[in-house]
Amino acid sequence: MAAVQNIRERELSRPEVMQKYPHISPFVIIKTDVQRRGVHFSAAALDRVDLTVHQVEYRGFSREATGAVPVSLMMRDGSSILTGFTAKNSGRVPYLVDVVEDKIVLTDQGTVVEEVDYWEKPDYYGKETSNHIPMWQIAVARPQRIDIYPFQYCEFWDTPGHGCKYCSIAATYKKAKKPKYVDLADIAETVREALKQPGRYMSLFLTGGSILSGKELLDDEVDLYIKVLKEVGRNFRTPKFPSQLIGTAYTKEQLRRLYENTGLSSYTADIEVLNKEKFEWICPGKAVRIGYEKWKERLCQAVDIFGFGNVNTGIVGGVEMARPKGFTGEDEALEAVLSEAEDLAKHGVFAVQCVWTVAEGSVFFNQKTPSLEYYVRLSEGLDRLRRKYRISADMDNYRRCGNHPDTDLSRI
Ligand code: SF4
């Protein structure tokens, strides 16, 4: 334990990482560190929130209407820092968004790091559906994407010990006391309304927790997404429309059913941890119900159906180093993760990282994330693989998603 602590004490600071990696955009380095360490807002920064202009809802599965902060930050280069989950008890000192010389800025222990702005609220946020549900509760907006979460729970949590250890969906679901399913008519109405805003969106996005039921495992999940995609697809004239689904890893038949019956244009199944042993420890439900090798195999099969460049997989960057069973050395962890990412890239599947945020309500609450340098090297490695295998990151780029520092590198 003491040895690990010493390693962490020798971590390079953000300015040192910037100096050591001058070819990596400083915006990407700042974004990564803010996500890794979390961010708080000063009273002055919150005073600059204009509820008529800015988006202040919590991101993702949570829909609390109180204690809201800006859902995200926008940097000067147009890239986003998603801040909806602020790490607590992560052993890291969070950044502070403050106001200095009349500008909203990110500060690190008193030093101004970079000017930031808040995301703008979309037009539909102030409206209600015919069922009198505020539309901001039905679909969440990113700067250029509409996000829909039709199923707000995850059935892996129904079996004790099967939830992913970094995930807080079950705790969030219980706390928010919300319905499991979002009403289909409300979704259709909200998307229709959102699309009236000219020029705002470039894609639609769907995700949610896993639904394990059905004739075959996951059939009900596939059926739900088919229903939602058919409904929102009425807004488009083309057979396929710009869209992404993050679902569970489906069988070839399920993938085909999804592709042939909807306008969905890209597919993601998050493997989360690119190492069989760590995957089995960290994502036990996925391991028992589907399995690591099968998850990879299904991703590769999805490329045959959705096409090259239209299939990827998300990883929770850094969680492979969680204690006590994760990798203890950053070099060893990087090598293991990138070699698995390369194996997938050879088959046209690219990996993207979400920076592991130690989430309240997760089994891994109270853990400490790896060094900033680790994340920078991971992003660099994932970007290098995409370039080597000539896979475009467009389906998950900084405009559509904005949550992956590695795909931010692909814009350069
Ligand atoms: S599959 Fe894992 S990460 Fe995804 S919602 Fe379920 S428990 Fe959470």
Image: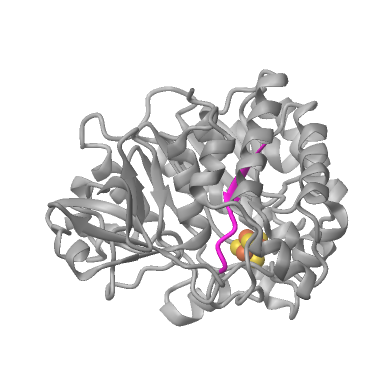
Quarter of the image where the N terminus is located: bottom right
- Residue 221 image point, x, y percent: 62, 55
Predominant secondary structure in magenta? Answer: strand
Between residues 245 and 144, which one lies in front from this camera angle? 144
Residue 25 seen by the camera: yes
Q: Is 30 above or below relative to 217?
A: above
Between residues 254 and 56, which one lies in front from this camera angle? 56
- The way the protein has been coloured in the rendering is one colour
- Residue 69 image point, x, y percent: 29, 65
- 356 is within the stretch colored magenta: yes
Q: Is 116 above or below relative to 7?
A: above
Residue at coordinates 65% horizontally, 73% vertically from top-left? 364
Residue at coordinates 78% horizontally, 41% vertically from top-left? 298
- Residue 207 image point, x, y percent: 53, 52
- Residue 286 image point, x, y percent: 76, 60
Residue at coordinates 84% horizontally, 55% vertically from top-left? 291
Between residues 304 and 215, which one lies in front from this camera angle? 304
- In the picture, residue 7 is in which quadrant? bottom right
Q: Which residues lie in the magenta part?
A: 351-358
